Amino acid sequence: MTTFIVLLGPPGVGKGTQAKILAETTNLAHVSSGDLFRENIKNQTDLGKLAKSYMDKGELVPDDVTIKMIRDRISRPDCSLGAILDGFPRTPAQAEALEAMLAEFNGQVDAVPYITAAESVLVERTGGRFTCRANGHIYHQTFNPPKKNGICDIDGSELYQRDDDKVETVTVRIRVYLEQTIPLVEYYRKLGKLIEINGAQAVEQVTKDLLAALKK
Ligand code: ADP
Ligand code: ADP
């Protein structure tokens, strides 16, 4: 038996934060498409170079390379029981590809928490986000500050502000989300898998709501 959970929601709503907490409480792997792209950029791979050209503009990386990257990732042994997918799928074509690849692994998407918040909240959260260089741990200058300024509590690496978290790029990312990802809300609702979660609450409350909804 596998369990695949897809976290759906706009940029900055708290998917990564919640995915990390859920991964710890459930022992499922955390698979973040954004983290995988950033790892490729850090390692200067061809995929990283390609992805960066889209990410810098706030646009989506093309479906074919994104799907291949995720297929490779969920084929790894740590996903044999399933995974929490954070940031994938983001287009209808990705959702269909996911269904096909999970069918191959005798799995399926079990639940799709859809985390929402007003645009002003997204701008505030991305604007204050700090990300850890080594492992992508997530902080916020006001809502979740590190103990030591600029240093990750968990692994001591440097914290940085993502280039695509500047407000102009966030505005583009929200528009791209509305155009290309919102169709997935109806797609998963029709399949009876969508669970709506209010993301405009404290981290702990969002986690409580998620765990309660996933138990059902
Ligand atoms: P956020 O967590 O703020 O939503 P991500 O780290 O998930 O941001 O994504 C950052 C960027 O990486 C996106 O703007 C996009 O360029 C690229 N990206 C991430 N996931 C996908 C995906 N599933 N399909 C296409 N591009 C993606
Ligand atoms: P996403 O993966 O959806 O882009 P993140 O989990 O990276 O979102 O969160 C975006 C920013 O908002 C981070 O700086 C994070 O620390 C902060 N954050 C996440 N959840 C909450 C919350 N419930 N309340 C306040 N800030 C939050």
Image (spheres, helix red, strand yellow):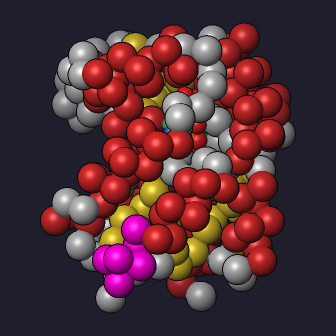
* Image location of residue 177, percent across then percent down: 72, 38
Q: Is residue 6 above or below residue 171?
A: below
Say which quarter of the image contains residue 151.
top left
Q: Quadrant of the C terminus?
A: bottom right
Say which quarter of the image contains residue 57.
top right
Most common SS among magenta residues: helix
Left or right of 78 in this view: 210: right
Residue 146 visible in the current orientation: no
Say which quarter of the image contains residue 34.
top left
**Which portion, as a residue range, is magenta?**
101-106
Left or right of 78 in this view: 148: right
* Image location of residue 70, percent across then percent down: 37, 51
Between 183 and 116, which is closer to the camera in this rendering? 183
* Image location of residue 189, percent across then percent down: 76, 73
* Image location of residue 202, percent across then percent down: 64, 48
Kindly identify the residue that appears in the image at 61 percent across and 48 percent down: 90
Left or right of 213 in this view: 61: left
Q: In this view, does 205 lie above or below 179?
A: below
Q: Quadrant of the N terminus?
A: bottom left
